[in-house]
Amino acid sequence: MKTKNFNILIIGSGPAGLFAAIWLEKVGMDKIAIIDRNAYPAGGLLNDGKLNFDYRVGMDVDELRITRADAEKIMREIKQVFSGFPRCRQVTFLDQHKEVLALAEMASEHGAQFIAPEQWHWGTDNGKALVDYLRSYLKNTDFLLRTEVTSMQKLNNNNFRLDCKHNNKSVHYNAPVVLASPGRSGAYWFRDVARKMNIQNNFGPIDVGIRLELNRKFYDIVTDIVYDPKFIFKTGRHDDRVRTFCTNPGGRVRMEDYGDFKLINGDALLGKKTKNTNFALLNTIALTKPYSDTTEFAQSIAKQFFLLGGGKPIVQRIGDFRERRRSSQATFNSTTRHFEVCKATCNATPGDITLAMPARIMDNLWESLKSMDKIIPGILHPSTLMYAPEIKFFDTHFPTDRFLETNIKGVFVAGDGTGKSRGIVGAAISGIIAAKGMLERTGNSFKNFGE
């Protein structure tokens, strides 16, 4: 079969891949292709659609080898693109200085850090329209959809060949430069490909925790000021890091199916709201010798919940948890125990989350929750729901240079699935950084890093 040649091949159509292509087209690069195994290119852009424009959230400037000024300059480019989509609305404004300062001071009194980024949101119900809008920026990029990359190899002429399957037929694509931005869903596939090519990688930390769902009246005092507030805790007992993540005022809790197990997540629609608010509380875990595989460790936790929940995640009322008993279907909505105050939006299995959650992680989560309840009284109302597990797989890390090029020259990485970001804006920034490196690798140049 004939092989088609491109200047740049991008694996993955999430924010990292899309913004790399947008930037490359902007500076005049042509013959770009984005390959994705899915029928609809999107990556993480279809889930909730929340943007944090703050260098402290969703990225590590040291890992990306950029300064705060660099990050803010690239974020302005990204914001300009997103703000052109009419259903992407700013939901957190930084001019509420007094209210934000008061929350930060109260958090500090209880040993927590509070971060209030500028935030924008479009909602899960507008995800496809947003992706169509971003694709409209790309006039000269080919989308090779329903195309699964089966292998990658470096040829004698220093080009790379991607062997792919499309509609059960073999297809091949060549390019001198490849960007791998596989997202979380493709992270372990690319790790296997990378190891076969001797691309250096190692295990990074992983986030394991729960998702809280509560009557939104208890949390509106915060989310009316900051749509997605960021609280970061350093626990006293174990000296571990716990953080809040992905708050959804008026949102819903959802399950994600990974085949061998299911995980919990949350989102919000722009056009339809519930009476609840949900957010994740995550404990960052890093492993060392003799066992450092954070992926396998986290998956073993997820499978325990899957087993105990009868094929579903587990949900437990705070009221039951505090009394050291499991939640049951019979009393799940008990009015005498005030459980009706928060009605579950997700059909998880009532049970005891402590049976499957490691004790150290459970200690950290509960200590942080008690601190949160002092900052925002009402979070630990008996009706509040704890769903488990919520796990964020950011755990494959690739050592790279300042343009996110790996030890194999011509192979670049970006986005959440390669350990370079934790969210849409961070992924887009990493994609743009890699795009600048790819431009240089193909023999082109640029004037200023932030252009």
Image (cartoon, helix red, strand yellow):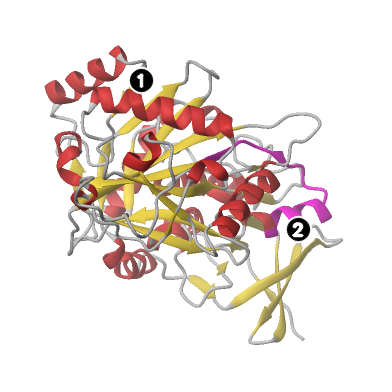
Visible residue check, residue 311: yes
Which image quarter holds the C terminus? top left
| Front one among 431 and 115 | 115
Visible residue check, residue 445: no
Mark 2 — residue? 193
**x, y (%) of residue 62?**
54, 27
Q: Which residues are magenta?
A: 189-208
Left or right of 368? Residue 183 is right
Mark 1 — residue? 112
**x, y (%) of residue 339?**
24, 49
Left or right of 111? Residue 215 is left
| Front one among 319 and 224 | 319
Which image quarter holds the N terminus? bottom right
Tag 2: residue type?
A: Val
Give the SS element for disc 2.
helix
Instruction: Judge depth for marks 1 and 2 and give the one in front.
Output: 1
Is residue 147 placed above or below 81 in the rendered structure? below
Q: CA distance from mark 1 to mark 2?
A: 40 Å
| Front one among 281 and 74 | 281
Q: Residue at x 29, y 54 (%)?
A: 82
| Residue 185 sits in quarter | bottom right
Mark nearer the N terminus (1 vs 2):
1
**x, y (%) of residue 8?**
61, 61
**x, y (%) of residue 338?**
20, 46
Tag 1: residue type?
A: Ala
Question: Within the magenta stretch, is there residue 198?
Answer: yes
Q: Residues within 10 Å of mark 2 (few under 14, many from 20)?
A: some
Give the SS element for disc 1.
strand
Q: Residue at x 29, y 57 (%)?
A: 344
